[in-house]
Image (tube, coloured by chain):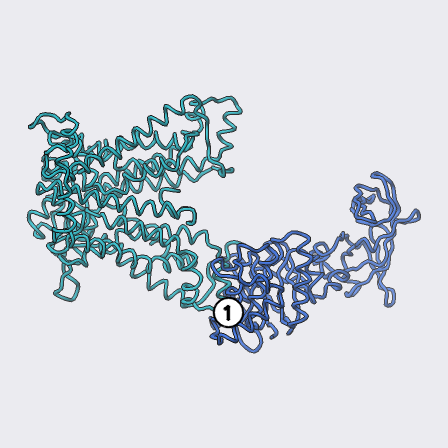
Chain colours: A cyan, B blue
C-alpha cells in the first residue's frame, strides 16, 4: 500500500507545480537550449559552416588538447590523493576522522583562483615565504607553477575532495557483514580490500572520476592564473581571452567553443550517471556501524603521514598567502620590522573597487540564496508529491547548469539575454545577467539538499494538515517550511558560499561597476598587486572556513544527505 | 455528524484495480471497521473517503454533500471535507507543542483566541492530556502520541473520523487500553467512525458493523456476531474466527430443516439459502464435540494449550483437518470420535 501516495490533494497543487516548474525550466534549461541553437544556425537558418570553421582553427585544437591533458592528468592526481584518503578514512580505525574529513573538504570550497594565488606564493623566486626562510630560488628563475605540470598539480589538489566524497559514500554503503564474511572465510588485510572492497566500490570510484574530470575541464581560475602567463591556453581561458579581447563580435565563435566544452562535459556526466546507476545493485545488509579495520602498529605513522599531507596542501599555501599580504611590497622578505597591514587596510577600506565588489558579491550571494529557497522549497515538495512526467524530466536535467563548465553557462546566458525578446533592452553588462546566471548555476546546489530532506519526510504530516482543513499555502507555511528549514538553511549557506567566491561565470559577465570578489582578486593579481590580492584572498578564506564551521556545528540537526561532506 | 454513502466506487492504480464496485452505506454515528488482509483495498477506501485519492469510478457522499464523483470529475480536496483522520504513524507535527498540534485545526478555521483555548482545553481534557499540553511530541510515549492525534482530529468537530490502523505501532497491553479510549470516545461523541485494521479481534471488540474486504471488494458487511456465525462465503468463514470449510456431499430439505452429509456423517445444518444451492459448511470449534461415540473418526495432529482449555488440530480419515476445543488433554496421535452439531452452510460459486 505504498504506491498510493501520489494523486491526492487539490488542483491548487497542480497549478502551483506547473507555475514553478515553468519558471525553473526557463531559468535553468532555456540558456543551455539557446546555446545549442546558436551553434547549429547561421543568421537564423540551420548551418554547420561556422562550427566547422572554428573547429578547424589550430588554436581551438591546441586548447582542446591542453584542456584534455590538464583535466585528464589533474583527475589522475585527484584520484590518487582522494582514493587513498577515502579508503583509509572509511575502512580503518584512524582517530579524529571528523576533523580530517572537514579539512579535506576545505580545498573544494576555496575558490580555484585563491588556490592558484596561494600556491604561487610559496614557490618561485619572489615568494615572500621562501625569501623569509632564505631558500628562495635566485631572481630570474622561472615560477615552476606557470606550466602545464603546475596546472595539473593544482587541479588535482582542488578536486581531490570530489573523489574522496563519492568514494567514501560508496564505501559506507558496503554492508559490514560483507567484509566480516570475507574475514571469517580467512581473507586477511589487503586481500579483503582487493578482492571484496575494491570490486564493490569500482562503480562509485568511476562515477567520482568522471565528475572530477568534468569539473577539472570546466575550471577557469587555475588555468587562467597559471596558464595565461605561460601562454598555455585551455578551452575556458581561450573563450575568456577571445571575449575579453574582442567583445561580443566573436559571440558566435565562442559559442561553438562553449559547445565543444559542453559536449566533452556531457559525455563525462553521462558516464558518471551510468556508473552511479550500476552502483545501487545488490548491496543488502546492515550499514549502521561504519567499518573500522584495525591498523595496529601502523596507525600512528599513517596518521602522521595523512596530517602532513593535509598540512602541505592546506596550511602551507595559506602561510604563503599570509606572508605576502603582510609585507609592504611584493618580493620583500617578512621580518619583524617589515610587517605591515598596509595591504589589508588598502584593499579592505581604501579601494572603492573592492568595497563595491564586496557589496556586489554579498548582494548576489544573498539574493541567489533567498530566491532559490523560495523557488526550490515548494518545487521540491510538489515534485515529491506529484511525480508528473515533466517533473521527472526536469529532475534528471536540473543538474546540468551546475555540472556544465561555468564558461558554457556564461556564454549561454549572454546569448539569451543580450537582446531581450520583443524589446531593444539588454541585460548584458548589468548585474542582473550575473544574478540570473547564479540562479541557474546554483539551482541544483539548493534543490538537492532540500529534496533529500523532503524524501525522508512522512507524507502523513502533510495529509494530517490537509485533513484538518489547511490550504496549500498554510501547509507550506506551517508544516513543510518549518520541517525542512534546516535543510533549506544548509542549502542557502552552500549557495552563499559558492556564489560569494564565484569567478568563472562572473569573469565573462562582469563590466565596470558589477565586479565580483572573484574578478577583483583575479584583476589585482593580473595587474601585479599581489599583496592586496593576497590580503583579499585571506579574508575570503576566513569567511569560507567560518561558514563551513557553522554548517558543521549544526550538521547533527540536518537530515541525512543535506550536508554535502557528510553523505 | 453524518452518514456516508458510496455507490459503485472503484479505484485503479496504473491499470491495476485496487477497489471494485463498492456500493454501501455507513449510518450516522456508526462505528465501522474495514477488515481484511494487507493489500485488500481497505486503506485505499479510507483514503478515498478522506480525499487523498480520487475515485476512478462511482460517487462518494458524506452527509448531504457530494465529495467525489468520477463521472463529473468533481473531487472535493481533503482540506474542505471537514473530516478527522488518525494516521498509523500519528503524523504529529514535530515542531509544534502538543497544545499547538491540537489547536491548529481551529487556527485554520479562524476561531477567536478564547474559542481556540476553550475547545483545545476540552479536547485535551477528554483525552487525558492536560498535563502534557506544553510538551513536544518527541517527549511523549506511543500511547500519548496516539491520544494527541485523536484530540487533534476531534477538536474541530468533524463530520466523520477515519482511522488508519491507529494501534498497529503500539504494544499489546497498550492496544487494549487504547481500544477502550476509542470506544469511549465513540460513545461520548456519537461520531461516525471508520476504522481500518487487519486485526479481527480489534474489529470485533469495537465495531458496530464490520466490512470484510478482499481483492478490492467488500465480501460481507454485517455485525461481528453475524460475520462469525453466518459467514456468506469461504473467504469470510476462513478469515473471521477459526474455521474449516468443507464441501457438502449431499443435502435434502426436510420441512423447515436441512439435512446434509458432511465428511460421511449425516447432520442438521442451518443456512440462509435454499437447500439446493448450499455447497459448503463452516466447521468452527463450537460445532464440534469430542466423544467416544462420535460418528467421525479422527486423529490428533497437534495440541495447543490456550489457557484453561486445549485447541486440538485433528485430521479425519478422509484428510480434512478440523479444529476442536476441549478441557481434557489428549496426546498427539490419539484416535477420537467427533460429533458435528448444526454448522452454518453457504453456497460457494
Mark 1, other Cα within 10 Å: few <14 / some 14–19 / many ≥20: many
| Left or right of A516 on screen, residue B323 | right
Instruction: Give me the chain letter of mark 1.
Output: B
Which residue is drawn at the image coordinates 35% and 63% (left, top)? A18
Q: Nearer the viewer, residue A395 or A233?
A: A233
Residue B303 image offset from top left, x and y in percent:
80, 43
Visible in this render: residue B45? no
Q: Nearer the viewer, residue B36 or A424?
A: A424
| Left or right of B277 on screen, residue A483 | left
Q: In the rendered view, tell whether residue B62 sits above or below residue A36.
A: below
| Left or right of A267 on screen, residue B268 | right
Q: How many marks?
A: 1
Q: Which residue is mark 1?
A: B105
Q: In the rendered view, tell whether residue A488 sits above or below residue B99.
A: above
Q: In the rendered view, tell whether residue B119 sits above or below residue A126.
A: below
For the N terminus of chain A, give its image quadrant.
Answer: bottom right
Which residue is drawn at the image coordinates 53% and 62% (left, top)? B134
Residue A418 image offset from top left, x and y in percent:
14, 58
Visible in this render: residue A558? yes
* Image quarter of residue A111: top left
Which residue is drawn at the image coordinates 12% and 25% (left, top)? A137
Amino acid at each position: 500500500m505504498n504506491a498510493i501516495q501520489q494523486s491526492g490533494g487539490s488542483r491548487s497543487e497542480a497549478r502551483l507545480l506547473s507555475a514553478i516548474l515553468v519558471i525553473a525550466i526557463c531559468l535553468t534549461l532555456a540558456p543551455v537550449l539557446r546555446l545549442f541553437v546558436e551553434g547549429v544556425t547561421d543568421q537564423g537558418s540551420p548551418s554547420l559552416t561556422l562550427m566547422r570553421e572554428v573547429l578547424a582553427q589550430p588554436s581551438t585544437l591546441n586548447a582542446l588538447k591542453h584542456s584534455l591533458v590538464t583535466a585528464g592528468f589533474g583527475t589522475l592526481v585527484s584520484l590518487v590523493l582522494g582514493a587513498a584518503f577515502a579508503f583509509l578514512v572509511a575502512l580503518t580505525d584512524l582517530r579524529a576522522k571528523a576533523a580530517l574529513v572537514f579539512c579535506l573538504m576545505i580545498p573544494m570550497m576555496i575558490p580555484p583562483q585563491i588556490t592558484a594565488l596561494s600556491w604561487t606564493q610559496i614557490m618561485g623566486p619572489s615568494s615572500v615565504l621562501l625569501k623569509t626562510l632564505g631558500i628562495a630560488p635566485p631572481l630570474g628563475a622561472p615560477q615552476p607553477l606557470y606550466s602545464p605540470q603546475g596546472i595539473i598539480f593544482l587541479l588535482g589538489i582542488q578536486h581531490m575532495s570530489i573523489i574522496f566524497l563519492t568514494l567514501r559514500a560508496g564505501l559506507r554503503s558496503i554492508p559490514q557483514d560483507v567484509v566480516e564474511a570475507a574475514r571469517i572465510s580467512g581473507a586477511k588485510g589487503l586481500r579483503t580490500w582487493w578482492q571484496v572492497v575494491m570490486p564493490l566500490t569500482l562503480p562509485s570510484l568511476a562515477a567520482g572520476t568522471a565528475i572530477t574530470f568534468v569539473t577539472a575541464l570546466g575550471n577557469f581560475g587555475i588555468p587562467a592564473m597559471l596558464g595565461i602567463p605561460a601562454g598555455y591556453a585551455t578551452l575556458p581561458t581561450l573563450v575568456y581571452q577571445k571575449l575579453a579581447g574582442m567583445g561580443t563580435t566573436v559571440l558566435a565563435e565562442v559559442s561553438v567553443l562553449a559547445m565543444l566544452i559542453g559536449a566533452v562535459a556531457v559525455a563525462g556526466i553521462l558516464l558518471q550517471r551510468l556508473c552511479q546507476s550500476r552502483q545501487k545493485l545488490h548491496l543488502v545488509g546492515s550499514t549502521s556501524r561504519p567499518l573500522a579495520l584495525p591498523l595496529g602498529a601502523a596507525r600512528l605513522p599513517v596518521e602522521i603521514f595523512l596530517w602532513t599531507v593535509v598540512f602541505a596542501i592546506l596550511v602551507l599555501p595559506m602561510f604563503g598567502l599570509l606572508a605576502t599580504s603582510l609585507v609592504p611590497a611584493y618580493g620583500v622578505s617578512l621580518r619583524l620590522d617589515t610587517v605591515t597591514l598596509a595591504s589589508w587596510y588598502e584593499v579592505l577600506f581604501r579601494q572603492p573597487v573592492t568595497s563595491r565588489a564586496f557589496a556586489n558579491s554579498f548582494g548576489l550571494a544573498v539574493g541567489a540564496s533567498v530566491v532559490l529557497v523560495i523557488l526550490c522549497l515548494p518545487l521540491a515538495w510538489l515534485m515529491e508529491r506529484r511525480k508528473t512526467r515533466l517533473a521527472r524530466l526536469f529532475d534528471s536535467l536540473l543538474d546540468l547548469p551546475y555540472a556544465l563548465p561555468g564558461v558554457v553557462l556564461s556564454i549561454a546566458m549572454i546569448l539569451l539575454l543580450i537582446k531581450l525578446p520583443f524589446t531593444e533592452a539588454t541585460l548584458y553588462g548589468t548585474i542582473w545577467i550575473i544574478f540570473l546566471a547564479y540562479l541557474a548555476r546554483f539551482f541544483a546546489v539548493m534543490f538537492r539538499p532540500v529534496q533529500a530532506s523532503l524524501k525522508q519526510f512522512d507524507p502523513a504530516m502533510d495529509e494530517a494538515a490537509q485533513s484538518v482543513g489547511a490550504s496549500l499555502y498554510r501547509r507550506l507555511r506551517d508544516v513543510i517550511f518549518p520541517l525542512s528549514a534546516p535543510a533549506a538553511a544548509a542549502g542557502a549557506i552552500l549557495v552563499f558560499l559558492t556564489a560569494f567566491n564565484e569567478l568563472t561565470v562572473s569573469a565573462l559577465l562582469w563590466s565596470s561597476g558589477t565586479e565580483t570578489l572573484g574578478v577583483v582578486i583575479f584583476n589585482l593579481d593580473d595587474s601585479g598587486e599581489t599583496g592586496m590580492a593576497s590580503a583579499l584572498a585571506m579574508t575570503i578564506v576566513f569567511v569560507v572556513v567560518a561558514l563551513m564551521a557553522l554548517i558543521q556545528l549544526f550538521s547533527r540537526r540536518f537530515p541525512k544527505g543535506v550536508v554535502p561532506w557528510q553523505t | 455528524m453524518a452518514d456516508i454513502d458510496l455507490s459503485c466506487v472503484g479505484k485503479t492504480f496504473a491499470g491495476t484495480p485496487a477497489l471494485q464496485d463498492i456500493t454501501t452505506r455507513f449510518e450516522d454515528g456508526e462505528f465501522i471497521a474495514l477488515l481484511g488482509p494487507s493489500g485488500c483495498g481497505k486503506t485505499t477506501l479510507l483514503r478515498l473517503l478522506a480525499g487523498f485519492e480520487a475515485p476512478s469510478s462511482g460517487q462518494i457522499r458524506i452527509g448531504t454533500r457530494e465529495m467525489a464523483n468520477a463521472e463529473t470529475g468533481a473531487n472535493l480536496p481533503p482540506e474542505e471535507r471537514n473530516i478527522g483522520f488518525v494516521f498509523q504513524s500519528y503524523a504529529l507535527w514535530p515542531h509544534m507543542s502538543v497544545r499547538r498540534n491540537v489547536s491548529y485545526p481551529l487556527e485554520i478555521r479562524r476561531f477567536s483566541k478564547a474559542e481556540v483555548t476553550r475547545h483545545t482545553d476540552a479536547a485535551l481534557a477528554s483525552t487525558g492530556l492536560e498535563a502534557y499540553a506544553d510538551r513536544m511530541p518527541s517527549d511523549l510515549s506511543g500511547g500519548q502520541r496516539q491520544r494527541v492525534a485523536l484530540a487533534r482530529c476531534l477538536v474541530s468537530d468533524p463530520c466523520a473520523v477515519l482511522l488508519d490502523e491507529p494501534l498497529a505501532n503500539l504494544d499489546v497491553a497498550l492496544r487494549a487500553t487504547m481500544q477502550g479510549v476509542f470506544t469511549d470516545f465513540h460513545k461520548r461523541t456519537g461520531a461516525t467512525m471508520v476504522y481500518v485494521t487487519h486485526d479481527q479481534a480489534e474489529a470485533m471488540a469495537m465495531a458496530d458493523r464490520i466490512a470484510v474486504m478482499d481483492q478490492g471488494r467488500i465480501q460481507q458487511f454485517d455485525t461481528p456476531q453475524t460475520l462469525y456465525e453466518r459467514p456468506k462465503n469461504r473467504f469470510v468463514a476462513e478469515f473471521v474466527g477459526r474455521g474449516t470449510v468443507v464441501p457438502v456431499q449431499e443435502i435434502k430439505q426436510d420441512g423447515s430443516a436441512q439435512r446434509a452429509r458432511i465428511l460421511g456423517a449425516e447432520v442438521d445444518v442451518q443456512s440462509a439459502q435454499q437447500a439446493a444451492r448450499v455447497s459448503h459448511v463452516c466447521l468452527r470449534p463450537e460445532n464440534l464435540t469430542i466423544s467416544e461415540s462420535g460418528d467421525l473418526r479422527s486423529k490428533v495432529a497437534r495440541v495447543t494449550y490456550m489457557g484453561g482449555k486445549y485447541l486440538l488440530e485433528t485430521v479425519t480419515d478422509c484428510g480434512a483437518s478440523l479444529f476442536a476445543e476441549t478441557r481434557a488433554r489428549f496426546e498427539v496421535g490419539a484416535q477420537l470420535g467427533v460429533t458435528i452439531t448444526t454448522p452454518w452452510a453457504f453456497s460457494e460459486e
